[in-house]
Image (cartoon, rainbow, N blue to C red):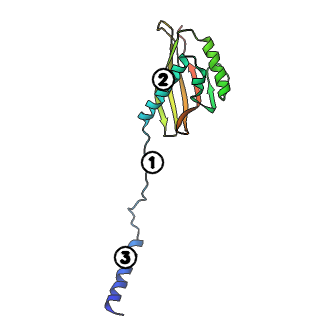
Amino acid sequence: MNRTTFFSAISLCTLLTAACQQTTDSKPVVQEAPKPDLAKMKTEIQALETAWADASNARDAAAILAFYADDAVSMSDDKPMFVGKAAIQKDSETWFAKSEEGSKITYEVMDVFGDENLITETGTGTVKDATGKVTYTGKYMAIWQKRNGKWMCIRDISNDDAKEK
């Protein structure tokens, strides 16, 4: 064996040994998923809630139904669970019939949790009569899922605040 071959073999063995050794302080590299921009998502959901309030104030059940997924479930105080758009539409129309003419509802998103595909929202609703007097306050939670690039409400629940005595 000549000198060059000998030193090449020794160098190769040294490199292989070094490459195969593990140190006790090395840790696996874990790549974290990017954190969702919740402030941006809250703004998006607030825009949806504002449009929803506009549809409610116009008493436009079709526009309200456009926010719901076909398999949505809606739950409110003192009512049965409404499953699917047909049941939600019927409830919306009943609510419109009972609403005082000139009353206006607004929704305020309080917080959002989730990611780019599924958001849970908490918020409040306020109804004012034609003179601007508050006639109703309540709170709600909605779950939004992105379907075909569009946020759709898949679940919501709401309840009334206690009435002043």
Residue placed at 67% from the left, 25% from the top? 87
Q: Residue at x 62, y 25 (%)?
A: 75
Q: Amino acid at mark 2?
A: Thr
Q: Residue at x 63, y 12 (%)?
A: 97
Measuring from the top left, give residue 89's x and y in whole percent.
64, 23
> Callout 2: helix, strand or loop?
helix
Q: Position of residue 28 (x, y in %)?
A: 43, 59
Residue 151: % across, % down: 53, 34
Residue under pointer 3: 15
The answer to whether residue 37 is visible is yes
**Amino acid under label 1?**
Ala
Residue 123 in sight:
no
Q: Is residue 68 above or below residue 94?
A: below
Neighbours of disc 2 within 10 Å: few (<14), some (14-19), many (20+): some
| Rendered image: mark on residue 33 | 1
- Please report whichever mark, 2 or 1, sits nearer to the chain's N-terminal start: 1
**Amino acid identity at mark 3:** Leu
Residue receiving disc 2: 50
Q: Earlier in the sequence, mark 3 or mark 1?
A: 3
Q: Nearer the viewer, residue 49 or 59?
A: 59
